Amino acid sequence: MRRTLSTYIWPVLIGILLAIVLINAFPERLGRLPSPSGDSLTVVPATPPATPTEQQAPQRPAPEVKEAAPLDRRGGPVSYAEAVEKAAPAVVNVYSSRVVERETHPLMSDPFFRQFFGNNDVPSRQRMLSSLGSGVIVSEDGYVLTNHHVISGADQVQVALRDGRETLARVIGTDPESDLAVLKIDLGDLPVIELTDSRKVAVGDVSLAIGNPFGVGQTVTMGIISATGRSHLGLNAYEDFIQTDAAINPGNSGGALINPDGALVGINTAIFSRSGGSQGIGFAIPANLARSILDELVTHGRVIRGWLGIEAQELNQELAASFGLQAPAGVIIAGVVSQGPADRAGLKPGDVLLEVDGRAVIDPRRTMSDIAAVAPGTTLTVSVARDGKSIEVELEVGERPTPQSQSQQTGSSQSAP
């Protein structure tokens, strides 16, 4: 009997084991799929899941959205030819040139070779450097606004009008810290551009850039005002740029940025580019700032700005903690010009400038611009933190020196207020 049972049990056990092996090897035969880990089996339902229409719909109302009005394409002009024809004649080409001395050949320093030319008869090695830019006629008297970098160091400046007339120009004055310059031409019946109030320029306004890119001739490009009040670009000491995506290329510098009415919005100055060409980020000096610089250079021959004689540095959280301040408010006085207004008032390097004339100091460039607007000779009250204590000091605002004289005094950057 025992032998008979063993005879039947072993085949049954072998069959069960074989069935388990087959199930694991071919799970799809039984409607089962292995799990991603391979440790367990997942049962695939024999019937497909219910479709969304078969499921019970949630009892929620449809969301309410705001619908925009249909786009009205009749509001804007289909052409800006009238605006261009109004402004373009006042945009001129500016050619500047200067003579530079070439380095003499190394053999000319040898007395043996110099004897063939004599001590005073060394051949002159000079060459002419030329640069190209644009300018804008802003008065019937012949004053032309352009960029400082267009005519910087030039021995001769020539202006060419769109009507074909050409003439030499006199440099009335330049302001490297705003990158503006004023020229004067003596011609009659000059076309003049109108200046708009750049404070009313809005992001999204259509803008047209007129200039002479790459020397190909007067060219007009179109875009919009991308941003206003751009600063901290490291281009100028005083920055308040209008940003536009109108194509601005080399040669456009000093040209006009106009609105659809043909009025001057700004003076094209710089581009942001990795290739040297336009990448849709151009900057223009606002018309209001250009007009104030124009008046200063024509009437005084220079731009008069207020000045404290300090070099400022931004304050971060770590520096604020080291000076005993709970928050990074104010700017650090990193340097003081000897015998300058701040020096005479007793300010020292390491002081933290907190307020100027009751206004909190947050950004060095913003503070520098505010101080520049103060007339020299004005008395201001400044608040500084020193040794963990806040003290108030009165000082008399001085006149900001030119960049050349300032660098001779302190060697500091032009961004010092």
Image (cartoon, helix red, strand yellow):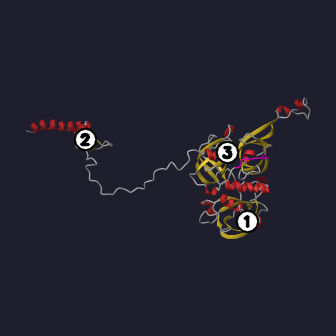
Considering only order in the chain, which callout, 2 or 3, is on the residue closer to the N terminus?
2
Q: How many angstroms separate mark 3 from mark 2 (CA)?
A: 79 Å
Residue type at the position of mark 3: Ala
The magenta span reads 185-192
* Residue 158 rendering spot, x and y as whole percentages: 77, 42
Residue type at the position of mark 2: Arg
Considering only order in the chain, which callout, 1 or 2, is on the residue closer to the N terminus?
2
Q: In this view, does 298 lie to the left or right of 250?
A: right
Instruction: Using a 10 Å C-alpha cutoff, classify the residue at mark 1 as few (fewer than 14 neighbours), some (14 to 19) or many (20 or more).
Output: many
Residue at the image position 39 percent from the left and 57 percent from the top: 64
Where disc 1 sits, the SS reads loop
Which is the main secondary structure of the residues drawn in magenta? loop
Instruction: Using a 10 Å C-alpha cutoff, classify the residue at mark 2 as few (fewer than 14 neighbours), some (14 to 19) or many (20 or more).
Output: some
Q: Specify the label residue 347 is tagged with.
A: 1
Q: Specify the label residue 88 is tagged with.
A: 3
Q: Quadrant of residue 44?
A: top left
* Residue 3 rendering spot, x and y as whole percentages: 10, 37
Q: Which of marks 1 and 3 is in front?
A: 3
Q: Which of marks 3 and 2 is in front?
A: 3
Residue of label 2 = 32
Vertical position of residue 96 compared to residue 408: above or below:
above
Q: In which quarter of the image is residue 31?
A: top left
Where disc 2 sits, the SS reads strand
Vertical position of residue 347 compared to residue 14: above or below:
below
Residue type at the position of mark 1: Leu
Where disc 3 sits, the SS reads helix
